[in-house]
Amino acid sequence: MKTGMNTRRRVARTVALLSAMLVVTPAVMAMQPTAAVTGPAVTPVSDDDIAFANRLSKAFKSVAGMAEPAVVHIIALQKRQQVRYDWFGMPVERGPVSLMPTSQGSGFVVSADGTIVTNNHVIADADQLKVRTADGRELEARLIGRDEATDLAVIRSDELASGGGVRPITMGDSDALDVGEWVVAIGSPFGFSRTVTAGIVSAKGRSLTPRETGRAYEDFIQTDAAINPGNSGGPLLNLRGEVVGINSAIASRTGGYEGLGFAIPSNVAKAVLDNILANGRVVRGYLGVALSDARPDQLQGAAGIPEVYRGVAVGTVEAESPAERAGLREGDVILRFQGQPVNEARLRTAIAVTRPGTRIEMDVLRDGQRQKLVANLGDYASVLSDRAATQNEVLIEELGAAVRTFTRQMAREAGYRDARVKGVQVTEVKPDTSAARSGLRQGDIILEVGNQPAPTARAFVDLVGKGGVGPGTALGVVRGNRMGTVTIVK
């Protein structure tokens, strides 16, 4: 009996507790909306804020409207032969050779004759080029000239010029661009043509490692405007609709946009464009000094120099060079080149894209005192050729390898027949360069560049100067007692 009474008491207490919970729980739930309503008041957007946003939107629309007709989608085609293989990987049937699309990118028209600027890596391996315009036309184009070291190329569509309606785009001054300034990118990411994105200039004077780009000369504008594969070669524009950069590279762990895009400054592109139109290739300037970024202790008296362009220390000055004739000395610090502040990468690029014979001015810091020096740039290719002739060995910076003439005496000592081995020997391969990535080795003997013989270091230098060595170029190479081919890659 007592056990039964205790059980009834416990049940009664449990029912009372549940009843209380059923009363309290709805009350708590009912209080939640009331708490939200009594939170901080939301301030309505003012008419001034809306007007400001509309003006900015109008500026972006204006840039897109001005630039889009000049932006083209570029399709590079290569000759490919279809081959059927057996189970052992041996070819058993070869089909006809046909043109196949191998890469796509962007470009923009810069003159009424159909001249287009783009990236070298968009068109480097093409056997045929096509451009698709904003109004849907697909037209033939041809290569005018290209420069692997700056990753720029110039092509032309005569059909575009003859068809009319060409609206060239204006090239602006990239040196006048400031960090934080609004910019607009237009291109064909992943094949989606006429895509417009906006952002700001994140930084200037950026350099990427050769492993990332394979380029010898760099002075990138960094932007957070969305740039993806296919944007390459398209314009980066300021809010006046002027080209201030050529979209060229991204830094990404995934291969897509992660907020880090890089564009070649328009002033570099203008110099390369003028050089190619005048010579069919880039004829490089030459100063004749070893360069490195200046250390803080070398900058006493250099107030007012931007941190990113902190000056360039002069190392060895070559005898009878334009630098020596201008009065440059080892230990000097170059603060400005043609009126613009410089770091090592920017100065090296500026010299390389400036035509030989150009009169250049430099602001130099020496012993804490500033002075101006004037030099007339020499011809880099001519200097290399002369050096190869007199010293019999030369470093090819674009390739990242040093070569020397493989003489008959050297051939005899190595046990080769004179008639069989006549070329240049690789004496050095620098790491993280095109030569290293292509598989060239120290000791290799290069007999041919493409189908052109390279019997001496001077002949090899001349072929490089004429643009004969770049991605896809086949080098006939002797290594030990074997003969084969090394294909140049970026």
Image: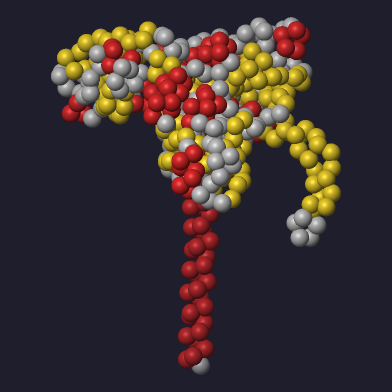
Query: Which residue: 59% across, 42% down?
Result: 420
- Residue 43 to residue 259: above or below: above
Q: Quadrant of residue 285?
A: top left
In the rendered structure, the answer to whether residue 20 lies left or right of residue 119 reads left
> Number of numbered discs present?
0
- Residue 77 to residue 12: above or below: above
In the rendered structure, the answer to whether residue 283 lies left or right of residue 129 reads left
In the rendered structure, the answer to whether residue 161 lies left or right of residue 347 reads right
Image x and y of residue 111, in percent: 62, 8
The C terminus, quarter of image: top right
Closer to the camera, 133 or 117?
A: 117
Closer to the camera, 234 or 331?
A: 331
Residue that extends furthest to the bottom in the rendered view of this protein: 1
Q: How is the image coloured?
A: secondary structure
Query: Which residue: 21% across, 29% down?
Result: 296
Q: Is any atom of residue 376 visible in this view?
A: yes
In the rendered structure, the answer to whether residue 132 lies left or right of residue 390 reads right
Query: Which residue: 33% across, 10% down?
Result: 375
Image x and y of residue 286, in percent: 39, 19
Image x and y of residue 197, in percent: 57, 25
- Residue 456 to residue 62: above or below: below
Q: Is any atom of residue 201 visible in this view?
A: no
Image x and y of residue 398, in percent: 48, 30
Query: Which residue: 81% across, 36% down?
Result: 97
Closer to the camera, 253 or 488?
A: 488
